[in-house]
Amino acid sequence: MNKTSAPAADPAALAWDDYRFLLAVGRAGSLNGAAKRLAVSHPTVFRRINAIERALGVRLFERARDGYTPTPNGEEAIAAAAEIEARIAAAERRLSGLDARPTGKVRLTTVDPLLYGVLPPLLARFRRKHPGIVLQVTADNHTQDLSRHEADLALRPGGEPPEGLIGRKVARLASAVYRPRALRLPRGAGPQDLDGYDWLAPGGNLAHIGMAQWLRRMQYDRRTVFSANSLLALRDAAAAGMGLTVLPCYLGDGERALVRVGAPVEAMGTDLWLLSHPDLRRTERVRALADALRNGLRELQPRLSGRAENVAPAP
């Protein structure tokens, strides 16, 4: 009697939501990372991946203590999921681009320091003018993927926009050295004369920014006593007296417990870019917010470039 094996389940029978879980685990390399991306629990991801493997009749990931690694079958499934995701995102962008009404939701991603005192007044003024538009803002140090429709606009410091996106420089951001008000320096000391002091430095995913690079070039990083992946944390730690630090002028100049040391350091300056996807250029609500941000940031340029008049005087 001949034995015949049962046919494997058809991958096309999987729902898009199943592919989302495969893609998240493949990108994160772990269940915890995937759970954060999907905003679900670790056990939910665990059960879902096991169910998908049972449905397909193949193992998609090798389990190890340090994470999940795709098998050849898993790599094929993840590639298919990425292709589906790209097609869905492209369709959403095209459909959104046909919407000429200044209503609906606009998703803006930016970095956390810009949401401290800089953007809220601009966004409040925008909402008064466009009450039909709902704003969803994500603040982190990771670039949301505009091509995958994770955001509609991105406001970020840095260089040229990535390929496939359109970008426009909307401001120049200056940065400077700041000391706690209680810390006295020799008369006339400038940013080049601060060896031997304790420093607070950008770390983690901020270790690549211009301010962190300048600290390394000056070799001040050898006296780092505190590092953080948050410029707000560096500002507050310096204000508490922990040591010298580097900050964007819009963040440091308004803190009364800090005093700027000398003029802004040109090597730490950076451009602020407003990025979007070409498919959304005709979307009225996105265009309206982009125009409001450009105009508002132009008005704030003296503060962003460190030329504002409200700089705390040195004692």
Image: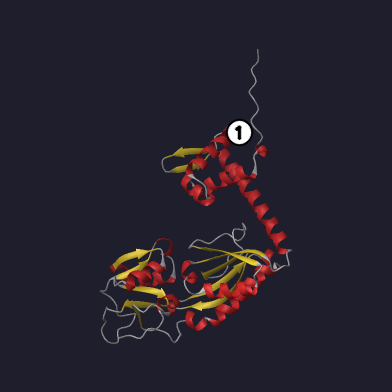
| Neighbourhood count class around disc 1 (C-alpha, 10 Å): few under 14, some 14–19, many 20 upward | some
Residue 70, compared with residue 120, is above or below; it is above
Q: Nearer the viewer, residue 104 or 203?
A: 104
**Residue 206 visible somewhere in the drawing:** yes
310 over 180 or under it: above or below: below
Which quadrant of the view contains residue 266? Answer: bottom left
- Please tell me which residue is depicted at 45% across the width and 43% down the height of the picture: 67
Answer left or right for 230 relative to 51: left
Would residue 262 appear left or right of 165 to someone viewing this image? Answer: left
Q: Could you tell me which secondary element the residue under label 1 belongs to?
A: helix
**Percent x, y for residue 34?**
51, 48
Is residue 169 toward the left or the right of residue 193 in the image? right
Q: Name the image quarter holding residue 268.
A: bottom left
Q: Position of residue 297 (x, y in %)?
A: 55, 78
Q: Can I make out residue 219 in this image?
A: no
Q: Quadrant of the image for the N terminus?
A: top right
- In the rendered image of this protein, does residue 168 appear above or below residue 69? below
Q: 117 or 159: which is nearer to us?
A: 117
| Residue at image coords 41%, 69% | 232
Q: Amino acid at mark 1?
A: Ala
Q: Position of residue 72 (x, y in %)?
A: 56, 39
x 45%, y 82%: residue: 306
Q: Which residue, given by chain and number where applicable, does mark 1 sit on?
A: 55
